[in-house]
Amino acid sequence: MKFSWIGTCAAMAFLAISIPFALASEESARDDARKAGRAVGSATREVWKGAEKAGKEIGRGAKKVGKEIGHGAQKAGKEIGHGARKVGETVGGAAKEGGREFKRAVSGEK
């Protein structure tokens, strides 16, 4: 029976001493977890802000490129249109002249 009293007293003393340390370390662990969570949250916000900023810059760049391509296409379209008009006028003039020559040839045969 003496051993069980001594064992019980030793266990009680151990618990009396270790409980405040256990609670303190639990609070410390909670604080450390909170700090780690805040650090992860802050890092995530920074990455998100950076990605958002990069996305906006990419969008602006794409808009500028699209605008330049649009202007280039419009200018090219005008140039193609002018060239086609000139070709059309030349072909039309040649066809008209060919028609006149044909008419003269046919009229001269009579």
Image (spheres, grey):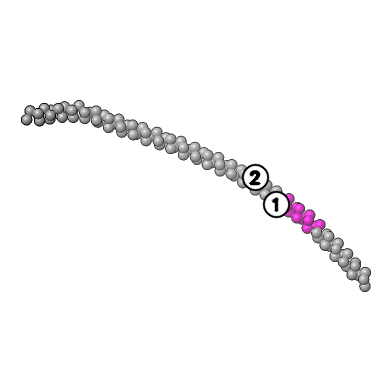
Compared with 59, 2 (above or below) is: above
Which quadrant: the C terminus?
A: bottom right
* Residue situated furthest bottom in the rendering: 110
Compared with 100, 80 (above or below) is: above
Identify residue for label 1. 77
Query: For the point 40% across and 35% down, which residue is it?
Result: 40
Report the side of 7 relative to 92 (left or right). left
Q: Secondary structure at mark 1?
A: helix
Report the side of 7 relative to 63 (left or right). left
Give the extent of the magenta segment.
78-90
Nearest the camera: 71 or 29? 29
Residue 27 in magenta stretch: no
The amino acid beneath tag 2 is Glu
Q: Label 1, label 2: how many angstroms apart (C-alpha)? A: 14 Å
Percent coordinates x, y for residue 44 in the rendering: 43, 37
* N-term mark: 1 or 2: 2
Query: For the point 70% across and 51% down, which residue is it?
Result: 77
Q: Secondary structure at mark 2?
A: helix
Identify residue for label 2. 68
Report the side of 18 relative to 69 (left or right). left
